[in-house]
């Protein structure tokens, strides 16, 4: 006949094992959820980055800078006789 302590040990081992499995499943689900949220955030950030790059290229375009220089600062291209060449 098996000793009563062996049966108690096995019952405790099965209970601990069941709790460990339950915890592992919970952690796996939590981490999967967190991973999905981070992937969604990455997608949003990549979209925002693309929009910022487009905006940057628009604001820094040569045509826009030249138009602002002419309209807001009153600048113009110098004529040939207004140019000064400086030699080193």
Image (tube, rainbow, N blue to C red):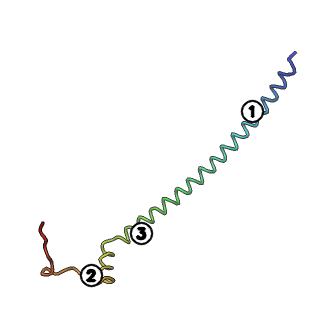
Q: Locate residue 76 relative to residue 53 in the image: left or right.
A: left
Please tell me which of labels 1 and 2 falls first in the chain.
1
Alpha carbon separation for disc pair 3 and 1: 57 Å
Verify CB contact (< 8 Å) between mark 1 and mark 2.
Answer: no
Residue drawn at x 35%, y 70% is 60
Identify the mark at residue 55; answer none if there is no mark.
3
Q: Quadrant of residue 75?
A: bottom left
Identify the mark at residue 7; answer none if there is no mark.
none
Q: Name the residue beneath numbered marker 1.
A: 17
Residue 36 in percent (x, y) is at 59, 52
Figure check: 74 above or below 49:
below
Residue drawn at x 78%, y 29% is 13
Identify the mark at residue 75; answer none if there is no mark.
2
Verify CB contact (< 8 Å) between mark 3 and mark 1.
Answer: no
Alpha carbon separation for disc pair 1 and 2: 80 Å
Residue 56 in percent (x, y) is at 39, 67
Residue 32 in percent (x, y) is at 62, 47
Q: Quadrant of residue 3?
A: top right
Figure check: 2 above or below 57:
above
Residue drawn at x 41%, y 69% is 55
Q: Locate residue 65 relative to residue 46 in the image: left or right.
A: left
- CA neighbours of label 3 inside 10 A, class few (<14), some (14 to 19), many (20+): few
Please tell me which of labels 3 and 2 falls first in the chain.
3
Q: Quadrant of the C terminus?
A: bottom left
What residue occupies the far front of the structure in this picture? Answer: 88
Residue 2 in percent (x, y) is at 85, 17
Q: Nearer the viewer, mark 1 or mark 2?
A: 2
């Amino acid at each position: 006949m098996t000793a009563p302590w062996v049966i108690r040990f096995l019952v405790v081992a099965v209970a601990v094992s069941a709790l460990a499995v339950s915890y592992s499943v919970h952690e796996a689900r939590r981490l999967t959820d967190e991973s999905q949220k981070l992937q969604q955030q990455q997608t949003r950030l990549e979209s925002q980055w693309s929009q910022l790059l487009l905006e940057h290229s628009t604001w820094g375009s040569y045509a826009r800078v030249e138009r602002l220089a002419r309209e807001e600062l009153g600048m113009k291209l110098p004529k040939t006789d207004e140019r000064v060449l400086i030699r080193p």
